[in-house]
Amino acid sequence: MANHNEKVLSRFFWGFLLFASLSTSAEESGSRLYANGKGWKLEQAVVDDKKRPRVLLIGDSILSGYKNHVIKGLEGKAYVDAWVNPHHQSEHLNNVLLPAVLANGPYDIVHFNIGLHGWQEGRIKGGTFGTLTKGYVQAILKALPKARVLWASSTPVTTKGEPGELKLEPEINPVIVEHNRLAARVMAEMNVPVNDFHTLLSDNLNLARGDRFHWTIPAYKLLGKKVTESVSLELKPILGPEPHKLRVGSSSVNLQADGGMVIAGYIGPRYSDKQEGELRVTAVVCETPGVNKVAIVSCDVLWIPRLIVDAALSEITAKTGISPGNILVNATHTHHAPSTAPAHDFGVSESWCEQVQLGIVQAVVDANKSLEGGACEFFFHLGEEKTIGANSRLLLPDGIVTWINPRRESAGKGKPTGPFDAQLPVLDFRDLQGQSLAIIWNHSTHTIGTLANNVRSPSFYGLAAQELEKETGTVVSFLEGASGSTHNIDAVPVSVCIERLKAVVLNARLKAKRHNVTRLLSIKRSFKFRVRHFNEEDEAAKIKRYCEKYFQAQAKYVGAVFANMRNQLEPQQGEERETLLQVMLIGDVAIVGVPAEYFTVLGVDIKKRSPFKHTFVAELANDWIGYLPDREAHRLGGYQTWMGLHSYAEQGTGERVADDVVAMLKELHD
C-alpha cells in the first residue's frame, strides 16, 4: 500500500512540476527557449546498484546537448540524472522547485548551471543575483549536506549567422559575462569548484549553431568531456583511489619590493632600500589523477589577510579548476617584508598587496602546469630542531610576562609559560628515479632575524629554503608552525640557524620513507568568533606596568600606539567575525591551517588529539585574525594578550579552533 501511495504521489508531483515548468516557459519568448531535446524535464537513471554513486546534472537547454556525453563517460561509475529546466534565479526556484528535484536523490554530486534564462531585464530584481545564487547552493547543501557541488558558467551568446562569421553578441553576452562574474564570486566564497563553459566556447565560436544560444555536436562533446572529467575527479574519493598514482608540480615566484614600501613586524614603520635573499611565493600542487588535486602555497610576508587570499583563489580556480577549498595559503611570518595589513604604528603597502596576490596566482598556475610529467612518490620523515627557539613568554617573579628581550628581562629567573615544539616534518615528493620534485618543511619559531642590518629578508627560514633549493635542484617551501609563543630568545645567529635547519632537512631526506597516497583530501570550513570586550583603564595599566620597568625608553610611544589601536576597536567590541579553518591530508600526513599567530600549546594539543600519526600545523593560513593565545595565557597577560589589532579575539577562541580542527581531522579519518 505504501509503495502504491508513493507512486501516486510521485506522478502527482511530477505532473505539478511539469505544469510549473511549462507555465514559466509560456511567459518567455525567443528561439533560445526551446529545450533543445526532449523538453523541460527531469530524466532519471534506472538504479540497479544502490551502492553506486548518483550524479545530478542541472541546466538549461545547453544541458540537453551534452548530458548524454556525460552519461556515457560515467557509465559503470555513477548513475546520472539530468534536470533540463527553463528557470532563472528566484526564491520560488530555491525554496520549492529545486528541493523537490533534490528529493529524488540522495545524490553524491550535483553539477549545475543557471544563467541563460535570466538575462532579460526585470526577470531578476536588481541587486539580488548574488544572494539568490548563493541561496541556490545553500538549498542544495541543505537537502544534500554530504554532496559535492560543482558549478558551470553560462555559455556565450553569439550573433546570428553562418559558422565562421559569428561573433559574441554585443548586448546579451555582456549580461551573461556579468552574471558569470557574480556567480563565480559566490562559488569562491562557498568553495564550489568551477567549470568555465563561457571561456571554453568563447574560444570555439566556430562551433556555434548560429541561432545565438545553441551549439553544434562538437561543442557539446567539449562540454561533456569537461563535465565528465570534473565529476570523475569528485567521484574517485567515493569509489576509492588507486595507491601509488601521484603527480606533483612546483613553482616559485620572486616578488619585487622597493624602499618606499613600509615593512611590517615591529611597533613602528620601517623602510629599507636593501634586501638579502628573495621574497617569494612558492606553490606545490599535488594530484592523484582523476581523484583530487590540492595546492599548498607559502608567502614571504608577515601575514596574509583573507581579502588577498580570496581574490587570488577565485582567479586560481578559474584558471586551473582547483577548488578554493583545496588550496592552503600560508604566511612564513617574516618580520622583514613589506606590510600586507596594518597593525601597531605601521600601515600597509597596497602595491605590495597587489604583487602578493598576483604572485599567489602565478605560482599555483605555473605549478599546475608542471604537473605534466610529474609522476612521483611521496616520502616523509619527522625531524627535530630544538636549538632554534624556545617559549618566549617567561613569567617573572613580579608577575609580568616577558616581551622585548626575554633573557635579559628574566635574568635567569623567568619560568616558561608554555612548551616549545621542536618537530620539523619534511615532505619530499620524488620522481620515479629518486629526484626531488618538491620539498615542504615546517617548524615553529617566530621568523625574526637577518644576516645584515636593516634589510628586507625572508629571514632564516626563507634563506635556508633558498639555499636548500640550490643543493636539491627543486622548489623548497617552508610553512610556519604554531609559533605565537615561541622565539629565538637565545639569539642563535641567523647564519647558524640557516646551517642547522638545512642539516635537519637534508638528514630527514636521507631517512625519509615512502608513504602510499591513497587519499588526497582537504576540508575548509567557516569559523565564527567575536571581538573581545575590554576595559580601557585596565589595558592601559598593563602596558604602562611593563614598559615602565622593561621598556622605559619607548614607554610613552608604545602606550600611545596601543591606545590608538584600542580606540579603533572600541566600537567593534562584541562584533562577530568570520574566518576559515582547514585540514588537508596527503596519504597519512595531515596538515592543519589556522588563520592566526597560534600559541604553541594549542598546536601541540591538536597534534596529540589528531587521529593521524603525523600531523603538523601551518599558522597564518588563509587569513589573519591576530594572536590566538590559550585561556591560561590570557590569565597571565603579556604583549600577545594586550588588546589591539594584533590581538582582539575573545578568550577561548584558540581552544575552540583546536576543537573544530580536531573534529575536521576525525572527519577526514573516518
Image (tube, rainbow, N blue to C red):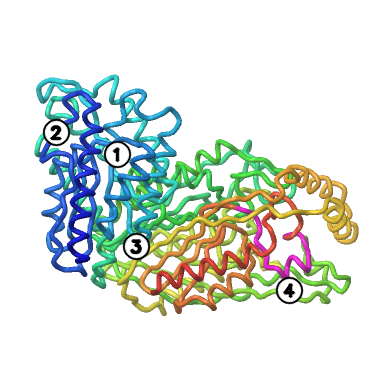
Q: Say what amino acid the circle numbered 1 marks.
A: Ile
Which of pointers 3 and 1 indicates the residue nearer the eye? 1
Between disc 4 and disc 3, the foreground one is 4
Residue shown at the point (74%, 60%) measured from the top left: 641
Q: Earlier in the sequence, mark 3 or mark 1?
A: 1
Q: Nearer the viewer, mark 1 or mark 4?
A: 1
Upstream in sequence: badge 1 or badge 4: 1
Q: Identify which residue is drawn at 53% across, 43% down.
A: 307
Instruction: Tell me how far mark 2 sits from mark 1, CA to CA.
Output: 17 Å
Indicate yes or no whether the magenta region holds residue 638. Answer: yes
Query: Mark 4 to mark 2: distance in Å?
Result: 67 Å
Residue located beneath label 3 in the image: 437
Q: Which residue is mark 4?
A: 417
Residue pointed to by mark 2: 215
- C-alpha distance separating marks 2 and 3: 42 Å
Nearer-N-terminus badge (4/2): 2
Q: Which residues are magenta?
A: 625-640
Choose the circle earlier in sequence order: 4 or 3. Answer: 4
Residue at x-position 49% and y-position 50%: 280
**Number of other residues with Cα within 10 Å of mark 4, as a class: few under 14, some 14 to 19, many 20 or more:** some
